[in-house]
Image: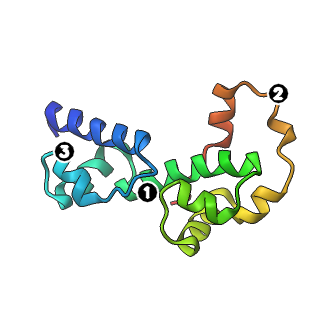
Amino acid sequence: MNLEDLVRLRRARDAMDRDYAEPLDVPMLARGALMSPGHFSRSFRAAFGETPYSYLMTRRIERAKALLRRGDLSVTEVCFAVGCTSLGSFSTRFTELVGESPSAYRSRSHDDGAAIPPCVAKIYTRPIRNG
């Protein structure tokens, strides 16, 4: 993989970080990186260790955790706020990454992390991809 490809892949990853709530898909991200969807997916995985879809869903779940900790939005509202269009898929992916359902996560106390600096909390609360 050449340096230009890596730069374009980083830009695509930055777009996912910034625009996670927008309707993003591999063909659109690949066009932005000037690659075919298949080449983009393979190159992204080689560069970052996971597929573009997996990376995007991790960002969405990470943001969903923060919204659910606030407690003022329903699980459905959070699902749509982070860019997911299916409550079932969102709940399944959330449970896979976090280890509990969005409802269970929302309903339990999160006071134990209240005194943690935000930069540490981000690392502590980041969803872990299992496989």
Check disc 3 and report the residue beneath it.
33
Dot 1 crowding, Cα within 10 Å, few <14, some 14–19, many 20+: some
Which one is earlier in the sequence, the residue at label 1 or at label 3? 3
Q: Position of residue 124 (x, y in %)?
A: 68, 38
Point 50% across, 60% down: residue? 131
Which one is earlier in the sequence, the residue at label 2 or at label 3? 3
| Residue 42 visible in rendering | no
Q: State which mark lies toward you, 1 or 2.
A: 2
What is the spatial separation of the Cα atoms under label 1 and label 2, in whole angstroms?
30 Å
Q: Position of residue 107 (x, y in %)?
A: 83, 58
Three-letter code for the amino acid on which mark 1 is drawn: Ser
Where, by quadrant of the figure, is residue 111 drawn?
top right
Q: Which mark is residue 45?
A: none
Question: Please, what secondary structure does the residue beneath circle 2 have?
Answer: loop
Check disc 2 and report the residue beneath it.
115
Q: Are marks 2 and 3 in contact (CB under 8 Å)?
A: no
Point 82% across, 33% down: residue? 114
Q: Which mark is residue 54?
A: 1
What is the spatial separation of the Cα atoms under label 2 and label 3, in whole angstroms?
40 Å
Q: State which mark lies toward you, 1 or 3.
A: 3
Point 14% across, 51% down: residue? 35
| Residue 108 visible in rendering | yes
Between 75 and 92, which is closer to the camera in this rendering? 75
Q: Position of residue 122 (x, y in %)?
A: 63, 35
